[in-house]
Image: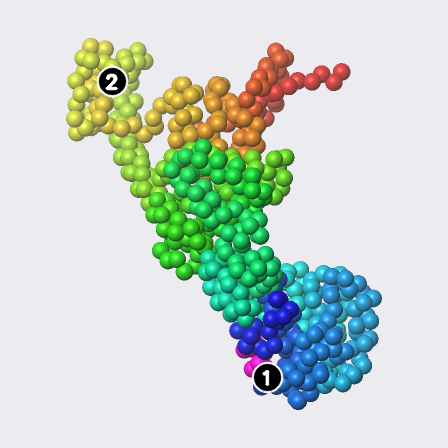
Amino acid sequence: MARKYRPQKFADVVGQEHVARTLQNAIAANRVAQAYLFCGAHGCGKTTMARLFSRALVCEKGVSANPCGECEICKSVMRGGDADVIEIDGASNNGVEQVRELRDQAAYAPTRARDKIYIIDEVHMLSVGAFNALLKTLEEPPPHVKFILATTDPQKLPTTILSRCQRFDFRLVPAAQLTGFFQTLVAKERAEITADALAAVAAFSGGSVRDGLVLLDQLLSFGNGKVTREDVEQVRGVASAETVAGLYLAVVEKNLPQALAFIDAVAQRGTNAGEFLDQLIEFGRDLLQISATKKFDAVNAYGPAKEALRKIGGALSLEQILLMLDVFGEARTRVKQRALSNPQVPLEMAVARLAGVDNLTSMPELLAELAGKADFAASAAGASGTGANAAGQSKTNDAPAQHREAATVAQKPAEKSAPASPPTAHRPLPAETTPIAKTEATPPPPAPASLPTAHCPLPTDSAEIWEKIKAAVARQHPADAVYLKDVDCEKMDGDALSLRCSPLTLEQCEDDARRARLAAIAQTVAGRTLNLNFLPRGAAPKKRAPVADEIAALPEVALVLKNFRGTICEVVNER
């Protein structure tokens, strides 16, 4: 069908009206350039547009935006076999010798047409030497020569080539436009196809007209003239729309057994795990569109999946949708990289993590919470400053050291004999009447218990510290919190917090960006820098040899350990 229904006029090219209009106007105004560059994804009409443009320039009845299409030159150009419109595959003719041969042939006049046109497909495959050999001819070709370069990867072209061409970017065709185009072709074929099946074909085409026509041609043969949505999914080898929507519903309802059952059903059907993850990501993208725009125009879902979008979209927040896309995207990357021998494991891990995530805090709520904490800290700093002024006044007195110690003991809140005083009572007293100069029998009134302190004491229990860090990570970085559920606190030695986790979680926690985020949150929670040491579960920590203590006591070594916050793990005697 792709060759049978190849467009014969500019108006027939689907989705590239901006290119067709510019070329037609250039022909009408006699503003045809010497070189053109057609860029875009495969199957969007680059070669077809190049042939139509070439035919308009070499038609026997004259240069026209609407060539006759009946003369021998027009017919041979559209077949791709005209002697004066030469199509070259850049992937197989990418050497310097082939370009030199092209350059030599370009000097000769065309055989029967007015111009000689070279269409070089996949031009980005040419070698550096071939591009250099083409430069001069491309910039100043003979008057009868035109170049049309086509590529799917314009980033690989040298800037010297790009600057010598008029560039046209071909767009992916929207699914709605593809659906209408396919419906017209099905009517010409006198076949039957359901609306859901057409929507599925358009969705699986990915914006490529040729891919859609190839799939549609295969479906008409499979269905013997009648095609349903189930036929499309079976021929395409993907999971059904009900399965995709059902898995999302199971994740939203925290029903992990049901979600894993869907994955097993997909595996039994023979669907590739990466293909299924692509469907899940596409469904998540539709959820994102609905959550952001509240419209269904831009979604690619079809059949039951489109109905499920209405139900699931109202049950998920934007943060939850973004988390799902992040986790599914990471699983897709691991499947593509073959990180595990069984590609189904990353998919199951992603579903298990998402099903175990609690409700996420939205960004406005998180900002409001942070603003409240900032106000609390500001008031605490003000109270601390008032106390510091009082302490400064006390130090000006020349009382003996034992009296100052007695005053410090008397200021503890645990002293029951000193009643709590209102905040207004804590103003600096004159030097001759400061409490520090008095005896132990007349201590100053204690600080009010209701005033907050600027720095909360760090809990001594390492497990409690780790739980507070995990809670802070869950609020600020929900995606990171998923990996910390498997991490247990072992002990705390000074500023080093030893943590145990599985090897898979250890791999995720070793990511530099994630470690930086965790370290920043740990410093905020603890009020000082903490070294988070992630260790594989089951591996016993190495004990330092006694000689390591002696080495650590050396001034030079101690300075290095202090500056880099390091520890001596092993001492090797090379003698």
Distance, label 1 to label 2, CA atoms, is: 95 Å
Residue at image position (69%, 64%) is 122
Residue 47: horizontal and vertical position, in percent?
Answer: 65, 70
* Element marked by disc 1: loop
Residue at image position (50%, 61%) is 193
In reply to whether residue 487 is colored magenta, the answer given is no
Reading the image, the residue beneath label 1 is 66
Dot 1 or dot 2, earlier in sequence: 1
In reply to whether residue 25 is colored magenta, the answer given is yes
Compare residues 266 and 31 and report the one nearer the observer.
266
Colour scheme: rainbow
Q: Quadrant of residue 454?
A: top left
Q: Is residue 115 left or right of residue 567?
A: right
Residue 296: horizontal and vertical position, in percent?
Answer: 39, 57
Query: Magenta stretch?
Result: 20-27
Mark seen at residue 231:
none
Kindly identify the amino acid type of the residue bearing the numbered disc 1: Asn
Residue at image position (32%, 42%) is 365
Q: Is residue 200 left or right of residue 293?
A: right
Crowding at label 2, few (<14), some or many (≥20) Cα neighbours within 10 Å?
Answer: some
Q: With respect to residue 37, does 553 lie above or below?
A: above
Crowding at label 1, few (<14), some or many (≥20) Cα neighbours within 10 Å?
Answer: some
Reading the image, the residue beneath label 2 is 413
